Image (spheres, helix red, strand yellow):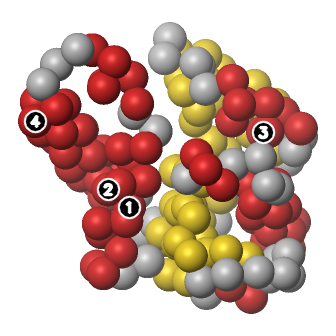
């Protein structure tokens, strides 16, 4: 397992995701879509919308990145996030990277990005990603780690690290 072999801060660990992690990954996705709850819709409708959005995203990822690997991030045995990577002979693509909101700001994102960059350097590969234009917190993190804006397409920005 690529990320599990890297030198991570004490208490932080990574394992390959499996089917037992599906509920956690869905809840993690929901935690990033709080604006759905602000629409004033009944909670059952919001939950149905979120579930549909999650299923669509998962299907899209499987179709676009059939060889991708998903990892669950743990802090002292508590699941705190996920990272999904597609590694080809040309680049590492960071498909999805989420830390639960209550655990953000503790350096976990930086530690994982540093580990991915270390792997990219070992393989002599760039790292690409796409980030929602409105996700200023994530964009700031990526910029701090040397990612550069490559293109902009409305709701998303493509970034690259070399």
Mark 1 and mark 4 residues within 8 Å of each other at the beta carbon: no
> In the structure shown, which secondary structural element does the residue marked by tag 4 occupy?
helix
Kindly report the distance in space between the C-alpha atoms of the residues bearing marks 4 and 3. Answer: 35 Å
Q: How far, Cα to Cα, is label 3 from label 2? A: 24 Å
**Residue identified by numbered label 4:** 44
Residue highlighted by disc 1: 25
**x, y percent for residue 138:** 69, 35
Residue 102 in picture, x, y percent from top left:
61, 50
Residue at 78 percent of width and 39 percent of height: 142
Q: Earlier in the sequence, mark 3 or mark 1?
A: 1
- Front: mark 4 or 3: 4
- Callout 2: few (<14), some (14-19), or many (20+) C-alpha neighbours within 10 Å? some
Of callouts 3 and 2, which one flags the residue occurring earlier in the amino acid sequence?
Answer: 2
Mark seen at residue 142 = 3
- Residue at x 10% of width, y 30% of height: 45
Is the residue under label 2 in contact with that under label 1 (CB below 8 Å)?
Answer: yes
Q: Quadrant of residue 109?
A: bottom right
């Amino acid at each position: 397992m690529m990320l599990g072999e890297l030198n991570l801060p004490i208490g932080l660990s990574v394992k390959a995701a499996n089917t037992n992690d599906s509920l956690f990954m869905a809840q993690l996705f929901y935690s990033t879509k709080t604006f759905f709850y602000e629409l004033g819709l009944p909670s059952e409708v919001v939950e149905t919308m979120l579930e549909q959005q999650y299923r669509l995203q998962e299907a899209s990822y499987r179709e676009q990145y059939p060889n991708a690997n998903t990892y669950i991030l743990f802090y002292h045995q508590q699941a705190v996030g996920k990272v999904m990577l597609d590694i080809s002979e040309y680049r590492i693509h960071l498909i999805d990277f989420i830390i639960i909101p209550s655990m953000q700001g503790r350096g976990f994102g930086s530690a994982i990005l540093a580990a991915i960059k270390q792997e990219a350097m070992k393989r002599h590969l760039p790292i690409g990603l796409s980030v929602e234009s409105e996700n200023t917190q994530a964009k700031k993190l990526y910029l701090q780690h040397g990612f550069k804006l490559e293109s902009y397409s409305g709701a998303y920005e493509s970034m690259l690290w070399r």
